[in-house]
Image (cartoon, grey):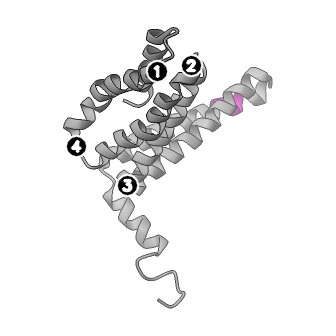
Amino acid sequence: MSGDFSTGVLSLDNFLHTALARAPQKFWWVIAGVLGILVLATAIGWVLHRRKPGPVIDNLNARVRAWWVMVGVLAACFLLGKVATLVLYGLLSFFALREFLTLTPTRRGDHLSLCLCFYVAIPLQYWLIGIDWYGLFVMCIPVFGFLLLPAVSALSGDTENFLERNTKVQWGLMLTVY
């Protein structure tokens, strides 16, 4: 390959054409609707800021800007394909579970089961989705996760508030990953 990036498999034009052609029509309707709402919200925020600036309006405009970023990232991942979308959702699950568990009291005996949640359950769940193994995906966390996590936590020998701690970890896994 000569150094000319306008031809060949790696060209941006070729990639965009393939990605845009692959997207279903419903995707474009949803994106158009969401972008329309965001344009309207941005215009309202701009008008409100011009009329009477203040911290509440600044907060509104910051939230609308955050939605622009979220929609852009999500649309880009959808256009990049299934793997990019699964990686994005895996990362979102990781961060959501981390935030949930920072508010949940845990003890040293829970560390191994927490490592299993973060570094085994999340990647396994999204890998099963990626290979279209629906039968195992739907029962991986509710059955195997709920069986193995308390067992691993019990191996530590820490029985203080055992049921409460494990219930919160399991609920966090169901809420943020499943």
Query: Residue 64's image quarter?
Result: top right
Is label 2 or label 4 in front? 2
Number of other residues with Cα within 10 Å of mark 3, as a class: few under 14, some 14 to 19, many 20 or more: few
Q: Is residue 29 left or right of residue 48?
A: left
How far apart are the two marked residues, 2 and 3, measured between alpha carbons? 37 Å
- Disc sitting over residue 106 in the figure: 2
Earlier-in-chain disc, 2 versus 4: 2
Mark 1 vs mark 2: give the one in front.
2
Q: Tell me if residue 3 is in the magenta stretch.
A: no
Type of the residue with mark 2: Thr
Q: CA distance from mark 3 to mark 1?
A: 31 Å
Amino acid type indicated by mark 1: Val
62 or 37, which lies in front? 62
Residue 81 image label: 3
Of all residues, the one furthest to the left in this rendering is 135
Position of residue 52 relative to residue 85, above or below, is above
Mark 2, secondary structure of its residue: loop
Residue type, label 3: Gly
Residue shown at 54% from the left, 34% from the top: 95
Q: Choose between 30 and 39: the one closer to the eye.
A: 30
Q: Which residues are magenta?
A: 44-48
In this view, the residue in front, 6 or 94, is 94
Circles 1 and 2: CB distance less than 8 Å?
Answer: yes
Q: What's the distance in space between the residues labelled 2 and 4, CA to CA? A: 32 Å
Q: Which quarter of the picture shows residue 147? A: top left
Please report whichever mark, 1 or 2, sits nearer to the chain's N-terminal start: 2
Find the distance from the CA under tag 3 to the CA under tag 4.
18 Å
Residue annotated with mark 4: 133
Q: Give the residue type that dot 4 points to.
A: Trp
- Kindly identify the residue that appears in the image at 35 percent across and 27 percent down: 148
Q: Which residue: 43% across, 23% down? A: 155
Q: Which residue is mark 1?
A: 169
